[in-house]
Image (cartoon, helix red, strand yellow):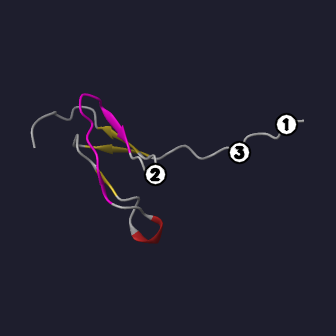
Amino acid sequence: MAASPTLQPAPETIEVATTAPVCDGDGGPLGHPRVYLTMGADDSVECPYCDRRYVLKPGTARGGH
């Protein structure tokens, strides 16, 4: 009989008001290096270290810097 897969908790989703969020995994000893993310044309981006998903808040204007 095959072993059942281990369920992992879903990655955290954070609403942000910028298309360029920064992630450090909450810093401290369990964090990771600071990563500057860019959504581009999408309304979300995932951190390559901790898989947190940053989602643009509804109604947030896309713009320059």
* Farthest-out residue, bottom: 29
| Residue drawn where x is 24% and y is 33% of the image | 40
What SS does tag 3 mark? loop
Instruction: In this rendered view, identify the residue nearer to me: 11 or 49.
Output: 49
Crowding near the residue tagged with mark 3, few <14, some 14–19, many ≥20 C-alpha atoms within 10 Å: few
Q: Are marks 2 and 3 in contact (CB under 8 Å)?
A: no
| Residue drawn where x is 28% and y is 37% of the image | 57
Relative to 9, is 54 on the left or the right? left
Question: Tag 2 or tag 1, which sits nearer the N-term?
Answer: 1
Q: Cα distance, mark 2 to mark 3?
A: 18 Å
Relative to 50, is 55 on the left or the right? left
- The residues colored magenta run 34-46
Q: Position of residue 36 (x, y in %)?
A: 27, 51
* Farthest-out residue, left: 64
- Residue 2 disc label: 1
Under mark 3, the amino acid is Thr
Instruction: In this rendered view, identify the residue nearer to me: 14 or 27.
Output: 27
Crowding near the residue tagged with mark 1, few <14, some 14–19, many ≥20 C-alpha atoms within 10 Å: few
| Residue drawn where x is 46% and y is 47% of the image | 12
Residue 35 location, quadrant: bottom left
Q: Position of residue 1 (x, y in %)?
A: 90, 35
> Which residue in the structure is indicated by mark 2?
50
Residue 37 lies within the magenta run = yes
Q: Cα distance, mark 1 to mark 2?
A: 29 Å
- When the figure is inspected, residue 44 is found, relative to residue 6, above or below; the finding is above
Under mark 1, the amino acid is Ala
> Which residue in the structure is indicated by mark 3?
6
Residue 14 lies within the magenta run = no
Question: Tag 3 or tag 2, which sits nearer the N-term?
Answer: 3
Q: Mostly what secondary structure, the magenta segment? A: loop
